[in-house]
Image (cartoon, rainbow, N blue to C red):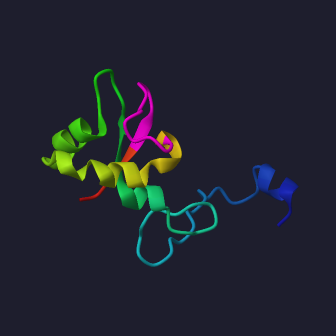
Amino acid sequence: MGLFDFLSNEGEKKPVEPANKPAGSGATDFFGNANAAADQGETYTVVSGDSLSKIAKNHYGDAAKWHQIYDANKGVIGSNPDHIEVGQVLTLPKA
């Protein structure tokens, strides 16, 4: 079956089936590699007045877990965990 056969009315009219997911049924990228961000947990957008300890207190119930958020977001936050900016999207790892 060629491309023109598919485009004509005579070709099969069957919906495209999704590709089989790799074992584990976790989220994957285009190449089938496990998506680390999806396994990390949810995301949070920084608002005015936030700090990593406030976010940790609200999300985990323990302000002392701020370092888990920092460790997961060093690329976004930078070298100073006290300097987060409004609008930054942080990944909140699973506790």
Above/below status of 72 relative to 90: below
Q: Any magenta on residue 72?
A: no
Residue furthest left as drawn:
61
Above/below status of 59 relative to 24: above
Question: With 29 as the anchor, is 56 left or right in this view?
Answer: left
Above/below status of 48 relative to 7: above
Residue furthest top as drawn:
48
Magenta residues (range): 78-90
Quadrant of the snapshot with the N terminus: bottom right
Question: With 23 as the anchor, is 52 left or right in this view?
Answer: left
**Residue nearest the viewer, comparing 70 with 90:** 70
Image-quadrant location for residue 71 = bottom left
Residue 13 lies, in percent from the top left, at: 65, 55
**Residue nearest the viewer, comparing 25 with 41:** 41
Question: With 9 as the anchor, is 34 left or right in this view?
Answer: left
Quadrant of the snapshot with the C terminus: bottom left
**Residue nearest the viewer, comparing 33 with 9:** 33
Residue 51 lies, in percent from the top left, at: 29, 33
Task: Please report the residue visible at 37 percent of the width from the left and 58 percent of the height from the top.
Answer: 40
Task: Please report the residue visible at 43 percent of the width from the left and 27 percent of the height from the top.
Answer: 87
Residue 8 lies, in percent from the top left, at: 80, 50
Image-quadrant location for residue 10 = bottom right
Task: Please report the residue visible at 41 percent of the width from the left and 75 percent of the height from the top.
Answer: 24
* Secondary structure that dominates the magenta span: loop
Task: Please report the residue visible at 78 percent of the width from the left and 56 percent of the height from the top.
Answer: 6
Residue 81 lies, in percent from the top left, at: 39, 41
Residue furthest bottom as drawn:
23
Question: With 3 as the anchor, is 48 left or right in this view?
Answer: left
Count every numbered label the image shows and give the total.
0
